[in-house]
Image: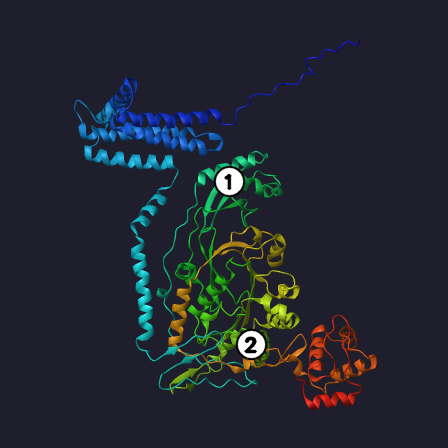
Amino acid sequence: MAKRKKRSKSSREAGPEHELPGGFWRQVVAVLMIVLSIVMVMTWFGSGGSLLNNFHRASLFCIGYASYAVPVILVYLAVKIFRAVANRLPVAIWIASVVMILWLAGLFGLPTLNQPNPTGGLIGAGLNALVIQILTPSVAAFIYAVLIFITGIFILQVSPVAVFKSIANALKTSKKEDAKNAKIARAAEKSETADNSSVSVNINSGVAVAKHSAKEPVTPKPAPTPEKALMAVSDPDWKMPSFDLLTEKQIPADSGDIQKNANIIRSALAEFGIEVEMGDANIGPRVTQYTMRPPSGVNLSKILARDKELALNLAIDKIRIEAPIPGTRLVGVEIPNVRPASVNLRSILESPEWEKNLDSLSFAVGKDISGQSVIANLAKMPHLLIAGTTGSGKSVMTNTLLCSLLYHNSPSDMKLIIVDPKQVEMVQYNDIPHLLTPVINSTDKALSALKWAVNEMERRYSCIAEARVKKIEDYNAKMAKKSATVKDQDGNEQSHDGGKMPYIIILIDEMADLMMMAGKDLEALIVRIAQKGRAAGIHLVLATQRPEVKVITGLIKANVPARISFAVDSQVDSRIVLNSVGAEKLLGKGDMLMRTTEMMGKPRRIQGAFTPDIDIDRLTNFLREQRPPEYNDDVVSQPVQIKGLSSITGGSDDLGRKYDPDDPLVRKAIEITLKNGKFSTASLQTWLGKGHGYVAGLAIWLEQIGAIGPQNGNKPREILINSMEDFEQLVSAGPVD
């Protein structure tokens, strides 16, 4: 029988150790503090036993009425222990709590000075015995109140300024703000019907209707001849809109417990061996940036890689780490506010930053992390690309841009071409006097407008070269010296600035829809304007919710350097728009990253300004009251081609009938078809050197006139003619019903 081997002590499995979680005993103390506070409250109503009642009488004897504040302080400290990092409170908080009880005992003891039963207890009486020798009771009460306030905000870890702001905001009731906004609305409505009660404006989707007078209908001025560039007549009677048309109400931000978040950031990085020194916290409208100084020699990639761990410890979804902050040796951690602040357009237009930017094409963007207003200049960009997913704030940004430009540009200074494929986003701007044409909703009219802009650009370059200047600003300054007098349609004399050229802003709200319909044609026109439009005063604003390579092509990116990215789905989309990551971590609803030629560095995080629909209606109604629109019919009547299919205006349902039977390409296609005995789109693309769109449209037209049969799956179409003579007879006979 084999001997059983004895198991050595080293081979025995060690039993499980009983380990307590971190901060266990401090949490137990916090629970006991809450229990003690409950018991103390029970003694107030005589619900305790003899021991507890004696304890209550002893506390009244020692600190007087201040004993009633002890349970409140204990509960607050217990909650702070549960929420603190490692459940540890600073010693200063404990000391401040004791000092708070002393100040309360002294304050409560002042009414019963030199009486047998002082309301401040023994401690309050002893403290007041020293204070009364220096101060009078009334002055001592004021000093006690100030000390209690300072100690209280020290315990609560808030700033005095924040307390005063909260009190001021509480005194302002919402009823007063609503009454003020209602007053503004009534004033706007009154101004619409005061002196110009005869003006009647009916806004229909895609249809411009404007009347200057009920007795005399408005007749648009004739369009300028193609040989001349677009000139403007100065308008000295034009009134700039008032800021009272915009909503003033704002909601302040709530950044949460800043000190707690700073401690969590420092402790979380310390767990990975990164000791940082916390700096200032910049409270912005949407996020709060916590700055920190890393030690010398640390690899910043280690800090950037800890974003998920920081988000977990802070219990939030997304954070953004900026390493380093441009122009500093600091690293920023951007944490969303508990409650974001509202940023309206009026607050930007009334800021000192707006007053400093008096350029014609300056527009409001929003407020940055530090709460400063951000103003951009479209003339310096010189073109702008806006991208972001649905609901991220892209359309709101375009409205803010347009409203900003309308606030300090008359129709003689700036003209607008607005393309809105969705037909609903820009309908509020119909019939304003700044428009060159009604808001465009179709692809062919959009291409026509861009083609007209290219021709207008060339005409302007001819005028600029003839004047021997380099850009539109110099041209207008030179022509301003050549004054003349002309009469408008009402017979009123107005000064003509010798051929002043207004700025032309082309805004395309949803570029992806147009690129899907006419990709190459649209791209070619956009690139042409982007390359040469700056000196001619023609600027592009392109917006899309699909930041894809097919939409934002390499040529467009190269010629549109200024970009704004709202929240996107992935890092790939962020790189397409900004050439860098970060946009995928944005919070939506106006949270953006902006990169311009002036920055040339990292994108700047900004909370975009919000312009409600009621403000846009007030502004556009104010503009319509002053002048009717003067549309230029040439803008949407240019001959264009969509994917090789000729189209002048209107729909593309009848595209096949636009083919010319005498066109050499058409006749060559018929000859190849007759020779091969079949109609093959792939073969014709090779022989003709045309794309699929041209050949597909040709097939539709040939089917309509009866030259070929209908489509039969993947098989070639049947040929219904035998010679070129048969083809000519079918053309002369017309399409087959």
Amino acid residing under circle 1: Leu
Question: Residue 201: where, in percent of width, then height?
Answer: 40, 77
Where's residue 549, x and y in %? Answer: 65, 61
| Residue position for label 2 | 469
Q: Relative to the observer, which residue lies in front, 729 or 228?
A: 729
Residue at image location 76% in from the left, 89% down from the top: 726
Q: Residue furthest right?
A: 675
Decide if residue 37 is on the left or right side of residue 380: left
Is 72 left, or right, of 393 in this rendering? left
- The answer to whether residue 215 shows anywhere in this view is yes
Spatial CA distance of label 1 from label 2 is: 59 Å
Percent x, y for residue 355?
A: 41, 62
Q: Is residue 165 above or below residue 695?
A: above
Assign the N terminus to one quadrant of the image: top right
Q: Residues within 10 Å of mark 1 (few under 14, many from 20)?
A: some
Callout in the foreground (1, 2): 1
The residue sitting at 18% across, 30% down in the picture is 111
Q: Toward which corner of the image does residue 533 lie, by quadrant?
A: bottom right
Q: Nearer the viewer, residue 613 or 2?
A: 2
Say whether marks 1 and 2 touch (CB < 8 Å).
no
Between residue 531 and residue 189, name the one nearer to us: 189
**Whether residue 275 is visible:** no
> Residue at horizontal 36%, vertical 59%?
248
Circle 2: element type = loop
Q: Which residue is mark 1?
A: 314
x and y percentages locating residue 460 in the rendered image: 56, 79
Above or below: residue 423 compared with residue 198: above
Of residues 402 and 293, which is closer to you in this image?
A: 402
Q: In the image, 13: left or right of 380? A: right
Q: Residues within 10 Å of mark 2 (few under 14, many from 20)?
A: some
Q: Amino acid at mark 2?
A: Val
Q: Please tell me whether mark 1 sits on a helix, a strand or a loop.
A: helix
